[in-house]
Amino acid sequence: MATVGEQSGDDRELTVDELAARVGVTVRNVRAYSARGLLPPPRMVGRTGYYGREHIARLLLVREMLAEGYSLAMIERTLDSAPATASSATLALHRALLAPWLPPEPEETTGAELAARAGVPEDSRLVDRLAELGILERRGDGTLRVLDPALLTAGLQVVGLGVPPDDLIDAQTTVNEHVREIAQTYVRMFVQTGWKAFVDAGAPPEQLERVRDTVARLQPVAAQAVLAAFRSEMAAAVEAALEQALSQLEGDR
């Protein structure tokens, strides 16, 4: 009977040293990836962990993504947003389609630093509201992880114009709801056209590059269309507001 770690063939379980040697990385890196949640937990027997095919596939994927220029933070976000039971092939497809839409690299900050950048007193309640919006998250050591630095920077610029933070967060909450609807509209369009044809064909690997190229091109085109529509609607809204304000001024004279 085969003992633990001695199964034959591809099903043989590996120790961390054997896993690292099999994939061509250091044991230190394996432990670092595991600590970040990039690898599923091993099967523990006493104090020894044993790794199987899913760990090999995941580690190969992490190594491949690092070689392509992905940071560990971006790999972590990609894997976190993928289905928990996703295969290596599914994760590769998920990565290819999601990459163009990922926000910039997360940043680390503190409540005091954030308040200083905004020019307002430190307020944990505002941090909680930003966390609810998904802009940042609290970490166990008391620091803050900014998940969307670009959006936070834009918000700080608006606060710098004199808009109270609470009012801005209220407005951004409403904007997020509308943007979510816009995003779903574009995704439905893509799913009903290019994606459906790809799936109906059995997701052939030779067509993946074309699908990935379509997704990459969709991002700037969709952003340009949304910005153009926003400018048009903003101009109309500003004009209406100005007419009302000017009429009120005339009436007060």
Image (cartoon, helix red, strand yellow):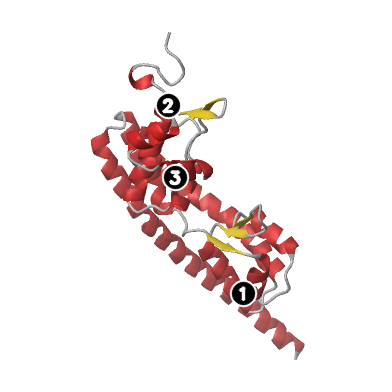
Write down the residue under mark 3: 28
Kindly tell me whether residue 93 is visible in this rendering: no
Task: Identify residue type, mark 2.
Answer: Gly
Q: Quadrant of the C terminus?
A: bottom right
Helix, strand or loop under label 3? helix
Task: Identify residue type, mark 1.
Answer: Arg
Residue sitting at 29 percent across and 30 percent down? 201
156 in relation to 124, above or below: below
Residue sitting at 32 percent across and 46 percent down? 212
Which-is-in-front pick, marks 3 and 2?
Answer: 3
Task: Point out residue 27 in the picture as x, y percentages from the top left corner.
Answer: 42, 41
Residue sitting at 74 percent across and 66 percent down? 123
Write down the residue under mark 1: 117
Q: Closer to the N terminus: mark 1 or mark 3?
A: 3
Helix, strand or loop under label 2? loop
Q: Nearer the viewer, residue 114 or 218?
A: 114
Q: Closer to the N terminus: mark 3 or mark 2?
A: 3
Task: Point out residue 178 in the picture as x, y percentages from the top left corner.
Answer: 57, 55
Few, some or many residues within 10 Å of mark 1 (<14, 14–19, 20+) = some
Give the mark count. Answer: 3
Cα–Cα span, label 3 and label 2: 18 Å
Cα–Cα span, label 1 and label 3: 37 Å
Which-is-in-front pick, marks 2 and 1?
Answer: 2
Cα–Cα span, label 2 and label 1: 47 Å
For the residues bearing labels 3 and 2, Cβ distance under 8 angstroms: no
Q: Closer to the N terminus: mark 2 or mark 1?
A: 2
Task: Identify residue type, mark 3.
Answer: Arg
Rendered image: mark on residue 241 = none
114 in relation to 141, above or below: below
Rendered image: mark on residue 52 = 2
Task: Point out residue 205 in the picture as x, y percentages from the top left corner.
Answer: 27, 35
